[in-house]
Amino acid sequence: MNYLCPSILAADFWELGRQVEIVERAGAPYLHIDVMDGIFVPSISFGMPVLASVRKRSGLFMDVHMMVADPERYIEELIHLGADGITIHVEACERIPETLTKIRELGAKTGIAINPETPVSAVLPYMELVDMVLVMTVRPGFGGQKYIIECADKIKEVRRIIDQSYPDVKLEIDGGVTLDNLEMNLAAGANVIVTGSAVFQGDIEANVGEFLKRM
C-alpha cells in the first residue's frame, strides 16, 4: 500500500489550520512535519507548538522528521504532544539504538533517514529497530528543491533490502517529488511519498486527489 504524506513546510502558515483540514478532507493519511534546528541543517523551521496545535484539530498520522542534532533530547516531549512517528537522521544522532528504542517504548513508530550522499549501508545496523527508512532525495534543510535523480538507485537498493529481510518496514522518500516523477519513485519501491510544494501550491484538494489517484 502507498501513502501520501504532505509536508507542511510548504504550507502557507497564515492559513495552516485551514490547509491541513483540506489535506485531511481530501484523503491524505499522513502529515509530514519537518523539525529543523539550524545546526544539522542551515534552516530553522518549527517545533513543539506547531505539532501540538495541529494535533488538537487533526486525526492524521503525524510523521515527524527530526532534522536536528542530538534528536534524543526531544523525543519524549514530541510524542507527548502527538507525534505518531519520529524519524531521526543517521548522520545526526550518536545514540541511534537507544533513541529508536526509546521512541518505540513511548508508543510511536520509528524511522531512520539518510541524506543523498550517505550510503545505504549506514542504516543496515538499525533495520530491526525501525518501522520506516527515509531516503532523502534532496539535501535536507530547504523546501522546493529539485529531485536528485541519482537517488532513484538508492531507493531501489533500500527496497531490495526491505523485501529480502524486513517486509513490514516502509520506504519513505522526501524532496522534489512531483506528479511528473511520482511513477518513477513508486516503481523504484517507495511507498510513503512526502511532497510539499506539489500539494500546497495551487488547489490543495485537487493536488491531493491527483496524487492519490496515481498511487
Image (cartoon, helix red, strand yellow):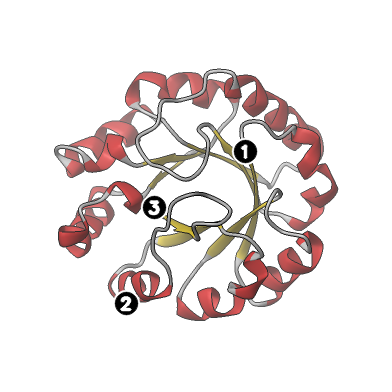
SS at badge 1: loop
Residue 170, position in %: x, y? 62, 44
Give x and y (percent) for residue 113.
Answer: 63, 46
* First along the sequence among labels 1 and 2: 2
Which residue is located at x 33 percent, y 36 percent? 212
From mark 1 to mark 2, how far is it between C-alphas? 32 Å
Circles 3 and 2, Cβ within 8 Å, touching? The answer is no
Q: Secondary structure at mark 3?
A: loop
Residue denoted by label 2: 56
**Are dots 1 and 2 in contact, CB under 8 Å?**
no
Residue indicated by mark 3:
29
Dot 1 alpha-carbon crowd within 10 angstroms: few under 14, some 14 to 19, many 20 or more? some
Residue drawn at 71 percent across, 49 percent down: 90
On the image, the x and y values in percent for residue 168 come to 69, 47
In three-dimensional space, the C-alpha distance between marks 3 and 1, rounded to whole angstroms, equals: 25 Å
Residue type at mark 1?
A: Asn
Question: Is 21 in front, or is 141?
Answer: 141
